[in-house]
Image (cartoon, rainbow, N blue to C red):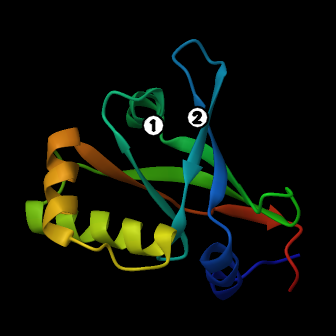
Amino acid sequence: MDISSQEVEHFLNHNHNAVLSTIRLNGATQLSAVTVGFYKGGAIFTTTKSRAKFVNLNRTPECSLLISNSNWRPYLVLEGRAVIFSEDTTDPTILKNILRTAYRSAAGKEHPNWEDYDEAMKKDRRVAIFVTGENIYGTIEI
């Protein structure tokens, strides 16, 4: 079953709970609960540089992301690579816009105070993680 970018977008507009699988230095799997939104055919979320998921993805960008509703059905899996947008790799204005996009997409609404949000993102040294879907599968209705 082929799942299109439009179907991924539709599913992610209504389902934001996800489990991210990354690879630890010792080869073991690290699982992290994340809240995601749709972005350019894949999924996006934010985290801080101190989290294991960031460290793992910075070293080994291959990952899997299972997105589901609270009942675990239907679900969608994106297997692919993570792209990290951080203060070290991304122009500050572009990073601010991507972090805002991640919020809008995951929350489904505008933030009540973007200036406060931007300051919190800088203070926390937040990054945006974009997961592409090189292999996409699941039980979503087509």
- Secondary structure category for the residue under label 2: strand
Between residues 57 and 52, which one lies in front from this camera angle? 52
Q: Residues within 10 Å of mark 1 (few under 14, many from 20)?
A: many
- Residue 87 visible in the picture: no
Label number found at residue 81: none
Q: Residue furthest top?
A: 26
Q: Is residue 29 left or right of residue 141?
A: left
Give the x, y percent position of residue 117: 22, 61
User: Residue type at mark 2?
Assistant: Thr
User: Residue type at mark 1?
Assistant: Leu
Circle 2 residue:
22
- Residue 134 visible in the picture: yes
Do residues under tags 1 and 2 come within 8 Å of each other at their CB atoms? yes
Quadrant into which the C terminus falls: bottom right
- The count of marks equals 2
Q: Residue furthest front?
A: 112
Label number found at residue 57: 1
Q: Residue at x 64, y 87 (%)?
A: 6
Give the x, y percent position of residue 73: 88, 62
113 to 131, vertically: above or below: below
Q: Residue at x 48, y 70 (%)?
A: 107
Give the x, y percent position of residue 128: 35, 54
Q: Residue at x 54, y 60 (%)?
A: 36
Q: Earlier in the sequence, mark 1 or mark 2?
A: 2
Tell me the distance, in whole angstroms, between the alpha carbons under discs 1 and 2. 7 Å
72 to 110, vertically: above or below: above
